[in-house]
Amino acid sequence: MFPVHPELPKMIVDWYVATLLKTPGKAPASKDQASVPEEVKVLDQIDQPGGAAKVAQTLEQARRGNPQAFLFPEDVVNLMGYDHLQSGDIKGAVEILKLNVVAYPNSANAYDSLSDALLADGQKELAGLNAKRALELLRSDTSDPEERRKGIRESAEQKLKQLGEPPQ
């Protein structure tokens, strides 16, 4: 089923000796350990307390050299923000979703998501402004599929209705 690897038995024995006999409970680091991609490091940093602010500074520096620089994917950070929101870390969610808006200022979804977090935080006026901004951006959005635009529109309008503001 698999090709023969003659070096495998020696590798297993070496690991056994190093891990279980010489240093029980303290396995040595692998020599061929793959390096962690930079994007994964950035995402991990965002997820730490105060990490969104640090990544915002890094993004600002990167954009001085390249105004189109992106350090992380919008959808992953959006999910991270909602994860924080659902776990009760509302302040963390707001910071993460603010970072997403900074990184993706033309994304209606980023603004709509931020408005959810702001509403959960009791910042009703800012939540309304961000929901309105999401609706403004949707008018010129031709890149997202219609179904996605419809979902964002309904979400933003629902928040505005909840806030007692007329939808745009």
Image (tube, grey):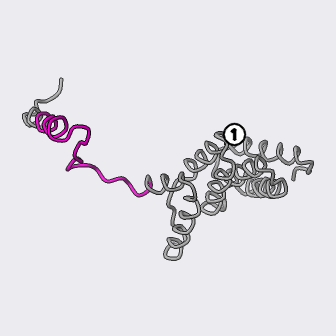
Q: Residue at x 74, y 53 (%)?
A: 138
Spot occupied by residue 97 in the image (x, y as percentages of width and height): 65, 54
Which residue was labeled with disc 1?
147
Spot occupied by residue 156 in the image (x, y as percentages of width and height): 79, 47
Q: Residue at x 80, y 58 (%)?
A: 126
133, 116: nearer the viewer: 116
Count of residue discs: 1
18 left or right of 88 in image: left
State which region is magenta. Answer: 12-39
Quarter of the figure that contains the N terminus: top left
Q: Residue furthest top?
A: 1
Local secondary structure at mark 1: helix
Q: Residue at x 53, y 67 (%)?
A: 59
Spot occupied by residue 63 in the image (x, y as percentages of width and height): 53, 72
Q: Residue furthest bottom?
A: 64
* Amino acid type of the residue that numbered disc 1 sits on in the rendered structure: Glu
157 left or right of 70 in image: right
Please tell me whether residue 36 belongs to the stretch shown in magenta: yes
Q: Can see residue 18?
A: yes
Q: Residues within 10 Å of mark 1 (few under 14, many from 20)?
A: few
11, 158: nearer the viewer: 11
Please tell me whether residue 26 belongs to the stretch shown in magenta: yes
Spot occupied by residue 167 in the image (x, y as percentages of width and height): 88, 50
